[in-house]
Amino acid sequence: MRGGTDAAVRTLVAVDFLLHERVRSGDRTAFAEIFDEHARVVYAHAIRTTGDWALAEDVMSLTFLEAWRLRDKLREEVRSVRAWLLGIATNVMRNIARAARRHRDAMSRLPPPEALPDFSDAIVGQMADAERLAAAGRALARLKRTEREVFTLVVWSDLGYAATAEALGIPVGTVRSRLSRAREKLRRLVEEELAPNAHGVEPRTYSGHISQREGTSVRPSHRRNGR
């Protein structure tokens, strides 16, 4: 039984090696196989991290475009393609966040827009079930970037500690300590975010963002990149 298991593992490794070799040589059909296998995981990681459906689509597309550009790295140093892709996606989101900050800084220097009517009363009835989810999203945004990245990869994308360490390029011990701090802070921050609602204070929201319920399935549009 042991021999059969070892043979199966060796077969899978050999298949992966051949697939990676094909991708490195520029075989777009082989890269499409990697896309089909991992696109949902990358998209789910992006939607849970950003809370924005459209932005998650962009992150997924940019991730696979970057993976195609970096396909020569599919050598022995990439032990997990999934971790490699999620690491690329994390870097893509860092770059997007930096660009968004620059945009906000530029917009803050413009004259303020005209005041618009407040339509909040029309949607109060729809907020009951969403308040805790929104509070969790706001609490997550208040974590340090390094803690948020570890939390989303381990908890939401179900990567193990070793794979997360590989994706982020940090030691496994650092993954464990950051995750522990993130969980402790999140419990406190969620309660802080929910506390004002008990006094009738309208919660802060972020325009254009959609909260994602943990565990909810997502359906990316499987656009094959790198063709």
Image (spheres, rainbow, N blue to C red):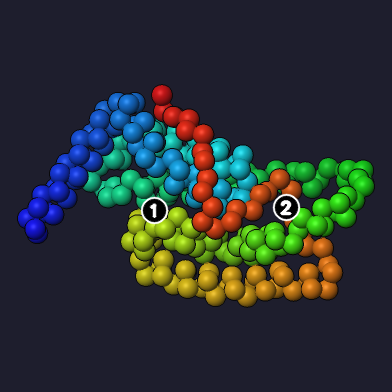
Q: Quadrant of residue 161?
A: bottom left
Most foreground residue, 36 or 126: 126
For the residues bearing labels 2 and 1, Cβ distance under 8 angstroms: no
Q: Which residue is mark 2?
A: 206
Q: Quadrant of residue 200?
A: bottom right
Task: Left or right? Give the position of 129 relative to 86.
Answer: right
Q: Which residue is mark 1?
A: 167
Local crowd size for mark 2, using a 10 Å CA cut-off: few (<14), some (14–19), many (≥20): few
Q: Amino acid at mark 2?
A: Tyr
Q: Position of residue 170 (x, y in %)?
A: 38, 61
Q: In this rendering, is residue 194 above or below 27?
A: below
Q: Position of residue 169 (x, y in %)?
A: 38, 56
Q: Nearer the viewer, mark 2 or mark 1?
A: 2
At numbered mark 1, what does the secondary structure look like: helix, strand or loop? helix
Q: Position of residue 102 (x, y in %)?
A: 67, 45
Taking the spot 42% from the left edge, 58% from the top edge, the residue there is 158
Taking the spot 88% from the left edge, 55% from the top edge, the residue there is 121
Most foreground residue, 216 or 165: 216
Task: Left or right? Give the position of 37 relative to 18.
Answer: right
Q: Earlier in the sequence, mark 2 or mark 1?
A: 1
Q: Residue furthest top?
A: 227
Task: Left or right? Give the position of 164 relative to 3.
Answer: right
Disc 2 from disc 1: Cα separation: 28 Å
At numbered mark 2, what does the secondary structure look like: helix, strand or loop? loop
Q: Residue furthest left?
A: 3
